[in-house]
Image (tube, rainbow, N blue to C red):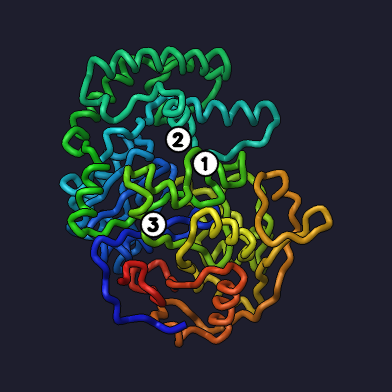
Amino acid sequence: MSNNLDVQIAKGRNVVVVGTQWGDEGKGKLVDWLTESAQAVARFQGGHNAGHTLVINGVKTALHLIPSGIMRPGVKCYIGNGVVVSAAKLLEEIAGLEQAGVEVRSRLRISEACPLILPFHAALDIAREAYKVKAGNEKIGTTGRGIGPAYEDKIARRALRVQDLKHPERFAAKLRELIELYNFLLTERYDAANIDFGAALQPQLDQGRLQYELVLEEAMRHAEQLRPMIADTSRELNDLHKAGGNILFEGAQGTLLDIDHGTYPFVTSSNCVAGNAAAGAGVGPGLLHYVLGITKAYCTRVGGGPFPTELDWETEGTPGYHMSVVGAERGVTTGRSRRCGWFDAALLKRSAQVNGLSGLCITKLDVLDGLTELQLCVGYELDGERIDILPLGADDIAQCKPIYETLPGWTDSTVGVTEYDKLPAEARQYLKRIEETTGVPVHVISTSPDRDHTIMMHHPFAA
């Protein structure tokens, strides 16, 4: 490995950024950093259940729906058709950025085809999780923001979409039908009158039923503000590419939360893998030129579900506690503590397989500073046999016993290091072993949340 500092950026080259674990890998920082070489950033799946934290000159900014490229002046930001959109949360996020002096509205474009998240989606999401607890079953661990129910409406072909906001009478008629359906589910199936939905939803609820007039009135207020930003984003992205512009496609969550390829059923409700950048943004797969897999130097997970390399992360003095505290492992969106564990190369092999990874970006390497010994999972024992790649399905994964290699840690600080040769020898050995065990080259290394604390081995936008 050596730094490649003399980079010739190709024109009309597009990069997909995906998380390779269970999300929270640090995608926001890398998207922001790579946007220096792009003219547009496009989100292609998920909703405001995602959370990307950017630190620029020591100032922290949390984004949930708006692409991370918004912090670069002049860069266009697209919310693609694969994203489910809460108008209320999007406008709240825009207002926060504008208060901080970031110009948003002239640069943000929202696909007409995005399904809308409305109050009844969040109400059903919360009611379902409460029902599981009442019945003594394990929760999925959703964020309670209505993401899953909104995707259900999309697949059932009954969703209200962003384009419907432009036609008030059509919107009102479709809304009435949906509210009748959801109110039936909330009251007859989930006994919603006895559920605490929180302050955000409570004003629109009466004995567990959403009030049609209040929901419609709020949606029409939002429509007035969103209308100038609604666009045919597929056409605009394809036109930008034809004109020689570079596009960065930004994924949310992580590969192991993918609805098809993740630890089902403990997954999100959309496809998080790189291939969905084409469908979720409205471009052909031939326009996805490079796939960068964002990967923590260890593993974390929020919510329920199997986690083969999980450590005790709550007991002071343990490696897991070190990762949790030093890594500030709390969810950006929910504030929930993240479970912590050792790096899992067998998991990364699954991610590499389904994403077609071109290279890895290893984040939070600095969190491991001070650990004198590291464990790296290279496979599992399952039913008495060794396997070298993460199996599919939560039941099999829960039975996997990790097989570890022991590597030396380091005591020198890596915080803010921007040259590979200045990393401790043990850190370089650890990165090399990750390359060898996953079969994917390490192209970028992040040594702190700050935008500039990045080591570039190979630039994804390089010619």
Label 2: how many residues lie within 10 Å, few (<14), some (14-19) or many (20+)?
many
Circle 3 residues within 10 Å: few <14, some 14–19, many ≥20 = many
**Badge nearest the viewer, 3 or 2:** 3
Q: Nearer the viewer, residue 338 or 67?
A: 67
Which mark identifies residue 268? 1
Amino acid marked by disc 3? Val
> Is residue 296 shown left or right of residue 248?
right
Gap in angstroms between the C-alphas marked 1 and 3: 19 Å
Residue 131, given in percent of the width and then of the height, sits at 61, 26
Asked if marks 1 and 3 touch (Cβ < 8 Å), the reply is no
The three-letter code of the residue at mark 2 reads Ile
Res 378 → quadrant:
bottom right
Residue tagged 2: 147
Distance between mark 1 and mark 2 Cα atoms: 8 Å
Q: Nearer the viewer, mark 1 or mark 3?
A: 3
Vertical arrangement, residue 399 with respect to residue 402, above or below: above
- Up-down relation of residue 430 to residue 383 (above or below): below
| Horizontal arrangement in the rendering, residue 340 relative to residue 69 (left or right) | right
Question: SS class of the residue under badge 1?
Answer: loop
What's under tag 1, amino acid-wise? Thr
Sequence-wise, the earlier of marks 1 and 2 is 2
Give the camera-side residue of 426 and 115: 115
Give the residue drawn at x 35%, y 63%.
55
Give the structural element (helix, strand or loop) at label 2.
helix
The residue positioned 48% from the left and 17% from the top of the image is 208
Q: Residues within 10 Å of mark 1 (few under 14, many from 20)?
A: many
